[in-house]
Image: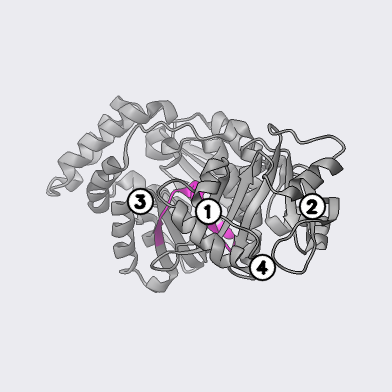
Amino acid sequence: MSFKIEACNLNNIDVAVKTLKENYVENFPAIRVTKDKILGKGISLYLLSDISQVPHNPIATFGLSSAYEDEDVWKEVRASLSDGFDPKKDAVVGQLSISSKDVAITRVVYGLLLDKAQQMGYERLFFILRGNVDFYKKLFNAILIKNDCNYDIGVDRKISALVVETKEIKQRGLRFLNRNLSSCFNKSDSLIKREIMNKSHWDEYSSAFDSIITPPQVELYNTISPLLSGVVLDAGCGNGNLAAFVNGEVSTYHGVDTSLDMVQKANANLQRLKEPQRFQAFHVQLEEFVNTHQYDVITLINSVYAMDNPSLVFKHCYNLLAPGGLLIIANPNENMTKSHMEMMIELYESQFSGNPAVADFKRLNLQFVTQYQHSFYTLDKVEGWLEQAGLSVTNRDCTHFHGAMNLIVAKK
């Protein structure tokens, strides 16, 4: 199952509240959750939807709040704390609801909860539970603050309060979550929106990209293809061109891209391949994409330069990879200048002279170089981010695209 995690706002808060009520609140008559309550108290609510279904099926929510709720239970908890509650470092976990008892989905939700808490700078998470205390103690190294709280949740059962330190989770818990605290998220990973090229640009680019594949691209795909096996994620898949080069060792190919037009073209192209049931593309941003299974290989081909924060993306890729999995990155380097692109276009233009998309292909590629050149990172820069994410670089090659493309293979 493939999921999209998204922060709730005015556009999707109604769906999130409905999901929350269906999964959780209806079982506890004394608890009242409304849109106004969530928005008014500054709760960061997240919605998880199954995008492998059409229409998308919301299956889980979780909330983070840097302030105590007004209910009496928090007065009891606060009185039991020895070192107080620091809203800069502490968060209350609330509105946690999961529609399925599937362990794989539970792993996804709790992993995302930890990621978001770390990224927002929270060091401690406070939970109110009506059960499963041992689950939190064994997996998350939770400390019991208050047992049998005097608070009515609408059923004949007492609740408990626990605290979890986001950087003190037991190894057993980290294995359960598929996480490594050496590559934990932090506030510096916050996204910095560049908005250099909007989605309509990439939608426009998709037509030219769909009909013209140059010899340097083919050479790159042929180099990467032997490294692909098992379950593969093509992040920034564009029109799915890489899929045509995969070998029989690939059991499943998933592509993700933020351009709806490219994803639609990709799915049309994928259906023309041998055994099309192996292939599927999703319209989603990589940072918001998760899955119940782990990937054997993730590729980032000509997509890192367009990302708001590569460091955050690499850490997310680490979480998506199976142990021993490969992350393959192909990104233009500092040699990819406008003059270098003009040289390559001139070199190969005659091969596509009869293609009506040639003019757009030339114009958009030159525009791409001009606007993204500052994101054509050096080899050392990319390798530094990979090491921070807990990945080990096993191979590097700077010869593709006439010396203007870095190809890096890293292992989990």
- Check disc 3 and give the amino acid type: Gly
Q: Nearer the viewer, mark 3 or mark 4?
A: 4
The numbered mark at residue 34 is 1
Q: Picture quarter containing residue 196?
A: top left
- Check disc 4 and give the amino acid type: Val
Q: Which residue is mark 3?
A: 238
Q: How dense is the environment of label 1, judged by Cα within 10 Å: few (below 14), some, or many (20 and up)?
A: some
Residue 97 in magenta stretch: no
Front in this rendered view, residue 307 or 129: 129
Q: Position of residue 52 (x, y in %)?
A: 45, 66
Residue at image x 65%, y 61%? Answer: 30
Numbered range of the magenta stretch: 281-296
Q: Report the side of 365 relative to 38 (left or right).
A: left
Residue 293 in magenta stretch: yes
- Check disc 1 and give the amino acid type: Thr
In the image, residue 248 sits, relative to residue 11, either above or below, namely below
- Check disc 2 and give the amino acid type: Ala
Q: For the residue labelled by badge 4, is the local secondary structure a helix, a strand or a loop?
A: helix
Q: Earlier in the sequence, mark 1 or mark 2?
A: 1
Q: Earlier in the sequence, mark 1 or mark 3?
A: 1
